[in-house]
Image (tube, grey):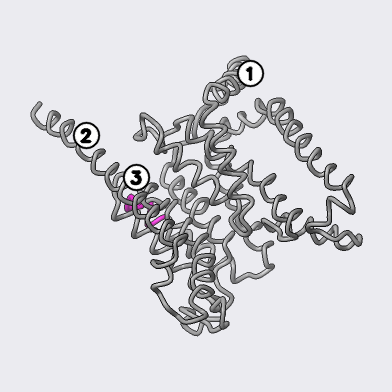
Amino acid sequence: TIVASLVGNSLMRGLIAGVIGLGLATIGPDPMMGQPRLTFESSILMPGLPFLVVLIGIFAISQLMGELEDHGKGPSSDALIPDVIEFKTWAVMREVLMHPVNLVRSSLIGVFIGALPGAGGSIANLLAYDQAKRSSKNPDEFGKGNPDGVIASEAGNSATAGGGLIPMIALGIPGSAVDAILMAALMVHGISVGPRLIMDNADLAYGMFVAMVVASLMMLVVCVLSMRLFLRVTDIPKQFIVPTVMICCVIGAFALNNRVTDLYLLGAVGLVGYGLKSLDYPLAPLVLGVILGPIAETNLRRALMSDADWTVFFTRPISAVLLAAALLSVIFSVRSVLKMRKKVRPATDEQDGD
């Protein structure tokens, strides 16, 4: 349903991109039986596609390839004035506070998604962006620098950190990889993480809550004070920015598993992303398919382990309600795309008549 709302102006292209993402997610060992799939007997594909490598390749490498086509050097060093930058910093903060509904809604979405084990900020920012786009009076401006889209994505992504602590403290189930590391560190010190954490170590549990609040406030202060320095990056010519970012991408992809083969995958995925972007295919549905593919497959196989009966998804009340909600969401998204096309056609006809 989120894929259907992230398709942009072409529903079919967005769905195709989502299917490609699901296909990439199936490469590697079967999550239940361990049998290799779609590896073509290649040792490079045998472990599967690391999610971070796919993410870097789709978003970063494909963007850098597009930047290489533009031989411009970017703005001059006098394009940004310190006084203007300082004014814009506070103006942005005021603009964020002028969208309280979007900010609170996106934060709640982030907390909810963060509380779901394995979901993470990648799903939260896409879902928050999706809801902001749905409720906006000007959805056509999303993807073109609309403040509501930026606020929704960042608020949803940031709120997952606090939400991930909920299942870890309450049930002993880490909500993300970072929470798993924190949980392991606590266990090393002999602290049992779970329902008895607050009973046995109340000071530690409440200290974690206070640390989250203090860290958020400190991040706000650090970001405001360093904003002028960060904005100076826009003064750097592209011929310096592109190779620097490319090197960082390569180092990050290699450091993930210390495998040279991941660099081959990085380049291949980057070419796929660049090709799709050149053909005006949206990349967000593809990434969403890669993220949700393993989660959806594992839970689907788990639900069918008993009798392999597909009717369980239609006869059980909870699953039937969720399927109905998903169907309504898809219908609403298709309707929005059709409305957008109707608005574009009269404007095109007027231009042709002139």
Of callouts 2 and 1, the N-terminal one: 1
The answer for how far apart the CA atoms under marks 2 and 3 are is 14 Å
Q: Quadrant of residue 223?
A: top right
The amino acid type found where label 1 is placed reads: Glu
The mark nearer the N terminus, 2 or 3, is: 3
Residue shown at 83% from the left, 42% from the top:
206
Is disc 2 surrounded by few (<14), some (14 to 19) or many (20+) residues within 10 Å?
few
237 sits to left or right of 132? right
Crowding at mark 1 (Cα within 10 Å: few <14, some 14-19, many 20+):
some
> Residue at coordinates 39% horizontally, 47% vertically from top-left?
6
Q: Is residue 276 magenta?
A: yes
Q: Residues within 10 Å of mark 3 (few under 14, many from 20)?
A: many
Separation of residues labelled 2 and 1 (CA atoms): 39 Å
Verify CB contact (< 8 Å) between mark 2 and mark 1. no
Which range of residues does the magenta coloring cover?
274-281
Q: Secondary structure at mark 3?
A: loop
The residue to which callout 3 is attached is 8
The secondary element bearing badge 2 is classed as helix
Secondary element at tag 1: helix
Q: Is residue 41 above or below residue 311?
A: below
Confirm or deny contact between disc 2 and disc 3 (CB under 8 A): no
The three-letter code of the residue at mark 3 reads Gly
- The residue carrying mark 2 is 343
Residue nearest the viewer, comparing 17 with 193 = 193
* Residue 247 appears in the picture as rendered: no
Q: Nearer the viewer, residue 222 or 336?
A: 336
336 above or below 175?
A: above
**Membership of 325 in magenta stretch:** no
Say whether disc 1 or disc 3 marks the residue closer to the N-terminus: 3
Q: Amino acid at mark 2?
A: Lys
Q: On screen, 344 above or below 31? A: above
Q: Which residue is denoted by mark 1 in the rendering?
A: 86
